[in-house]
Amino acid sequence: MTELTRLTIAEAREKLAAKAFSALELTDAYLAAIDAANDKLNAYVAVTHDKARAMARASDERLGKGAGGALEGIPLGIKDLFATEGVHTQAASHILDGFKPRYESTVTANLWADGAVMLGKLNMDEFAMGSSNETSHYGPVINPWRAEGSNADLVPGGSSGGSAAAVSALLCAGATATDTGGSIRQPAAFTGTVGIKPTYGRCSRWGTVAFASSLDQAGPIARDVRDAAILLKSMASVDAKDTTSIDLPVPDYEAAIGQSIKGMKIGIPKEYRMDGMPDEIEALWQKGIEWMRDAGAEIVDISLPHTKYALPAYYIVAPAEASSNLARYDGVRYGLRVPGKDIADMYEQTRAAGFGREVKRRVMIGTYVLSAGYYDAYYLKAQKVRTLIKRDFELAFDAGVDAILTPATPSAAFGVADQAMSADPVKMYLNDIFTVTVNMAGLPGIAVPAGLDGRGLPLGLQLIGKPFEEETLFRTAHVIEQAAGRFQPAKWW
């Protein structure tokens, strides 16, 4: 049965249609894998055994009638940020203790409509605030990868660390994730998986717990580029309940895979060559450039001059929006309530006990930059910088560039409770250096495994595309995947 969990979504879909095994057998194989591994990896915060089996049986019925959907019988993990009706939804935060919504997020509803099976809810950084999955109320997720000759636990990246770890460790066929500043692409790079952050507005945000509403976007983490394309096709849709979702047809992303990239222009931004960038990252980037060239693409140097301001601007805009969004958690209607001597005291006590340190830090930063006397100096200036970042990309694309190739992260995965990281929030924030520009500009970006570092840990490359041209990213990412091969951790759990 363990062999069933090795199948990609594309392979499992084919075999389910051919009746090689049932959706229930496939689901049971994944549930057994989760039960055996989750104590060590901590990827799931809730496993929905009964619901998964009921959904799988319903899939088998539909498959038996020849009425299967695009994801019929495919078992998925769902990030704890997506509302799932009647099932644990807490954004990995203490303040949402016991919350089980009476509604379904649009993204998950789309997946269930296509026949997917829910295995459970995946761990994450609290309210998606973190780059290592160490801020979760449920404790850190452990990366399935280990450095050669070492037993030290590594982080899977964040905030979608549970999603990336579960996909990498074969604890789900694919997973939903969200990306506000790199939270799909960075964990994908750290775990040897593929993660795509689609264009802002491609997937509905309705029913997804908000961090920073102008930056958040849902997307999939999968084992390979084809699986990511299959998942995004089902996740994406226009939605009357989310006015930022775009009414554009959702293409057949899978059809783009394998198409030639001959004649395409791939931009290489000089600003992404950071001071002190590890030689391994630079060498990987060069390798990626050669793979693109070998496939017939034209490599052009480009400039994105406002890149250096992206990280500070992001860490003003995102906390400002978070301080507004998280004001709704007050202990009145749902979740944690800590009694106080009056209602104001109850708010204070509940938030003090319910929010973790990183969430408090960002809410305080956000409240500060929005306060009278600082709004113009910080928030307004950051929004102007954001416009300039977006303009940099527009100029590059107007000049004929089809996609932009960059590193995905400044390093491979680091250790859990790494003192240098945990003692210095800014050092942790620097993990997003290559990814935040994409969110600030609302563009699509994909991280694809491209090699291993000197310690045998996965490294990823990132491709950035024009708005709503995810097909171009799947085409170009597939070229990298074909050249680099696929990577899997050695099983120790």
Image (cartoon, rainbow, N blue to C red):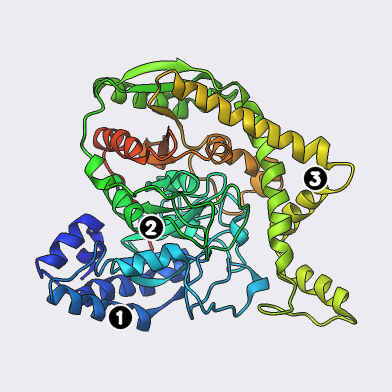
* Dot 1 alpha-carbon crowd within 10 angstroms: few under 14, some 14 to 19, many 20 or more: many
Q: Earlier in the sequence, mark 2 or mark 1?
A: 1
Kind of residue sitting beneath label 3: Val
Of 92 and 253, nearer the camera is 253
Decide if residue 32 is on the left or right side of residue 130: left
Q: Look at label 1 and name its amino acid.
A: Arg
Residue 303 percent location from the top left of the image: 53, 18
Dot 3 alpha-carbon crowd within 10 angstroms: few under 14, some 14 to 19, many 20 or more = many
Q: Amino acid at mark 2?
A: Met
Mark 1 or mark 3: whose residue is earlier in sequence: 1
How crowded pointer 2 is (Cα within 10 Å; few <14, some 14-19, many 20+) is rated as many
Question: Against 134, is 368 above or below?
Answer: above
Toward the viewer: 242 or 92?
242
Q: Which mark is residue 369?
A: 3
Q: Which residue is mark 1?
A: 53
**Picture residue at 21% right of the left edge, 34% below the top:** 259
| Camera sees residue 223 | no
Q: Give the SS element for disc 3.
A: helix
Q: Nearer the viewer, mark 1 or mark 3?
A: 3
Q: Considering the numbered disc 2 on the image, is that residue within a helix, a strand or a loop?
A: helix
Residue at mark 2 to residue at mark 1: CA–CA distance: 22 Å
In three-dimensional space, the C-alpha distance between marks 2 and 3, rounded to whole angstroms, equals 34 Å
The residue singled out by tag 2 in the image is 235
Do callouts 2 and 1 mark residues in contact (Cβ within 8 Å)? no
